[in-house]
Amino acid sequence: MTLPRLQPEQGPPLTRPSRSATAPDRTLLRAVLALGVGGFSIGTGEFVIMGLLPEVAHDLGVTIPQAGHVISAYALGVVIGAPALAVLAAGWGRRALLIALMAAYAVANFGSALAPGYLSLNLLRFVSGLPHGTYFGVAALVAASLAPPGRRAAAVGMVMLGLTGATLAGVPIASALGQHYGWRAAFVFVGVIALLAVVLVRLYVPAMPVQRGAGPLRELQALRNPHVWLTLAIGAIGFGGMFAVFSYIKPTLIEVAGLPLARVPLMLALFGTGMVVGNLVGSRLADRWLMRTIGGLLLWSFLVLGGFVFAAHHVATAALGLFLIGTIVAIAPALQIRLMDVAGEAQTLAAALNHSAFNLANALGAWLGGVAISAGLGWTSTGWVGALLALGGLGVFALALRADRHRHSPGGAATQA
């Protein structure tokens, strides 16, 4: 069935924009900027700890690998929290839910800054991860519902820009605070930005009525939908290749390309730039050719990741390769819109599960990349691992296309999103 979408009213075309004609655009812009600030806080909180593990380990009296468990604890919180909170809060208004999620994220990060020991920090990082997936899922639904026809993916991409932009600005700022004032200051910074997002969402995201019949049972219908599972599998497998390479990028650049340690941050900035560019371009492509964009980006991932095996041997080509690897994030808005289209009435759960799939991709890619390195295949073997994961994503994509043809055939199920 077709879900009604909240759309701004469209007036007749005018030669000179009037206040009434531009009001919907201003509403959309303010809303996605407010939602993007929340994404900026979450992105900063997720990634900043990776550069502060030595400081955390020293302060808490554990080894660096043990300190790394706080990263896994956060990811586990995302995987569990996304479906759980989406189902439990299915009857909430979307603006109220977004405010509650960001307030919880702020409190959890302030709590992380006050954690007295190793176990408490792991627990608080797990709690910090719980709102992550549901926030992005609901924010994407709100942005898409406010956008005019043909601009849904672009609106979702603007929300995701907060997450990708965090790799360029939020993480360096929080890392600098952590270096100068202790790692706890980084989480205070994240909590303050989350509180700012609470205020902006309350001011600029319009209240939307709760859909009739909304509730946990209706959201759980998404788990019975094979098209939802296939879309999630595309992300969990095909997107894992980026993490297979990026998880080990620092030693790869130093040991293979011969990059001086002091220049690693500059290279990482190139990766962040690639993410921003990919997010903007991918969202616009998805608005025009959704399924072609998904398939094309999986093929692009295969070529870029496989090419990095050879590019990694020289600093200049490694820099280009790292920028291109960042652009793989372009698939995220496309998969988000695809889930909205196939989820029927179970929109919130399906949208939130997209971020659980991305975190599974993170875990899968990092694990398989580590297996290849441990097997003695060398640092660049992560590129082959990534390319194979992209091929796996293409295989699932082919199954999704086949399922779509069956759904739209005279003898198939004709249920439309």
Image (cartoon, rainbow, N blue to C red):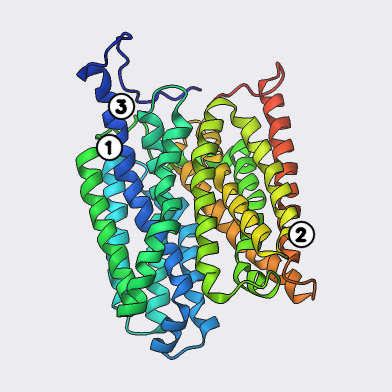
Graded by Cα atoms within 10 Å as few (under 14), some (14 to 19) or many (20 or more), the crowding at tag 2 reads some
Three-letter residue code for mark 2: Phe
- Which mark is first along the chain, 3 or 2? 3
Three-letter residue code for mark 3: Asp
* Apparent side of residue 100 relative to residue 297 in the rendered image (left or right): left
Residue at mark 2 = 310
Q: What element carries label 3?
A: helix
Label number found at residue 30: 1
> What residue lies at 63% left-to-right and 31% top-to-bottom?
291
- Residue 87 against residue 132 in the figure, above or below: above
- Residue 380 against residue 289 in the figure, above or below: below
Separation of marks 2 and 3 at Cα, in angstroms = 45 Å
Three-letter residue code for mark 1: Arg
* Apparent side of residue 17 relative to residue 401 in the rendered image (left or right): left
Residues tagged 2 and 3 counted as in contact (Cβ below 8 A): no
Graded by Cα atoms within 10 Å as few (under 14), some (14 to 19) or many (20 or more), the crowding at tag 1 reads some
Separation of marks 1 and 3 at Cα, in angstroms = 9 Å
Q: Which of 199 and 316 is in front in this view?
A: 316
Q: Position of residue 234 (x, y in %)?
A: 65, 45
- Which mark is first along the chain, 1 or 2? 1
Label number found at residue 25: 3
Q: What element carries label 2?
A: helix
